[in-house]
Amino acid sequence: MEYDTLIALIRQEVKPALGCTEPIAVALAAARAAETLRSCGASPELVEVKVSPNILKNGMGVGIPGTGMVGLPVAASLGCVCGKSKYGLEVLHDLCPDAVEAARRMTEEGKVKVSLAETSELLYVLASASGGGHSAEAEIKGCHDAIVRVELDGKSMLEAEKCGCGGNKAEDSSALDPNLARYITVRDIYDFACNVPLEKIEFMMESVQMNSRLSDEGLTHPYGLQVGRTLIEKGNSPVYGDTLLTYAMARTAAASDARMAGCTLSAMSNSGSGNQGITVTMPVIAIAEKTGASHEHLVRALALAHFVAIHIKGYLGRLSALCGCVIASTGASCGIAFLRGGGYGEICASIKNMIGNITGMVCDGAKVGCALKVASGVASALQSAVLALDGKCISSNDGIIEEDIEKTIANLGQIGSIGMRSTDKMILDIMTCK
């Protein structure tokens, strides 16, 4: 496959996101509906949002950036008050104290209603804004920033808006089909990371700058459970120790601490998830910092890590009962192995070691506790890479592992996208009945 196509796919799946992307998708839909309503001179008096179960699950307990509040109603009201849909996943970029207060009042006055949609889509948001005798709707489907329908008083305003994930080709003929990620192989990814001209992937350094800044924020301030800060502060203890593992876990968890608690800094996301983007990149960045890796080696390792996560995610879909940390930390493990001199065989071994280890980690919603799962994923990533570099790989006699790496990845995808559907429903039932 041509380098330019592969680069376009990475750019499509790796982009800045402000806040957890499930509530941000709600804010984006609400913003677009409110903008459409205002285009005819009316102001939103009521906003109704319908979401798929997975959106509800991931939006119940996560902090909304810059507000000190949680929940989808807050996200919808902020989207309506200050959101700008042109910013995509950074829709709340213009957030300010006055907007937060206006959104708080709007929510408390019952002007925002959120309910479950009757849909088979895993990622779905329908926002309706009404006022002044007019009504507008914006629908998101398939990808967090894929606005596929906008209507004003029942009249279609567009076929589909550009989102960058391939689900809206009516206006964006350059967008790639996200299923393309499934048809790329680990061999393709490895060869790409090794041989693509460096200048074509220099944009990987944007991940370093953005996610490192978020990590610094989490290490400096007491966000969430302070997983990262605690690991760093206890780094000289007999339990943690001042090791590469401790540093990588702390740097990565700190970024998640900050993001999930409502930090107003953007993350460089992967496959629609900021936490996945953090988990793919920060362990690789941390190891590179501590071992003095060259600029080129870091850039290529990050390209490999991002791409492995995108490839595996292609088998799972945007949302599932399987924690995204499993996929993201697998990408990180490959990046670490590459950074430490591993070749194609070691990359495959790292993936198999990861899949044989943490496949069962479930997603029970986005929340500050995600930083704990991120730290666990990083620990497994380093462990898997070290074993792979020492020539040790989990056997195809074990569990869902097969000799063929692509079949192994497909098995993981089948478990996460099909086998765990009932688990997903049970998790949501438990969360909504507490």
Image (tube, grey):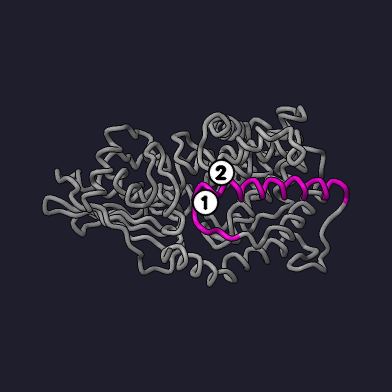
Label placed on residue 176: 1
Give the x, y percent position of residue 235. Answer: 71, 34
Foreground of the two, 85 or 173? 85
Secondary element type, mark 2:
helix
Q: Residues within 10 Å of mark 2 (few under 14, many from 20)?
A: some
Is 8 left, or right, of 241 in this rendering? left
Inspect the magenta stretch and tell me whether residue 364 lies in it: yes
Q: Which residue is mark 2?
A: 8
What secondary structure characterizes most of the magenta part?
helix
Label placed on residue 371: none
| Number of numbered callouts drawn | 2
Q: Residues within 10 Å of mark 1 (few under 14, many from 20)?
A: many
Foreground of the two, 187 or 278? 278
Is 104 left, or right, of 358 in this rendering? left
Q: Residue at x 48, y 53 (%)?
A: 166
Residue 197 visible in the displayed image: no
Q: Quadrant of residue 264?
A: top left
Secondary element type, mark 1:
loop
Mark 2 touches mark 1? (CB < 8 Å): yes
Q: Quadrant of residue 43?
A: top left
Q: Which quadrant is home to the C terminus?
A: bottom left
Q: Residue at x 57, y 43 (%)?
A: 277
Mark 2: amino acid? Ala
Q: Quadrant of residue 124?
A: bottom left
Residue pushed farthest right?
Answer: 391
Give the x, y percent position of residue 107. Answer: 26, 49
Is 263 left, or right, of 228 in this rendering? left
Q: CA distance from mark 2 to mark 1?
A: 8 Å
Foreground of the two, 142 or 351? 351
Which segment did they paint magenta? Answer: 362-391
Mark 1: amino acid? Leu
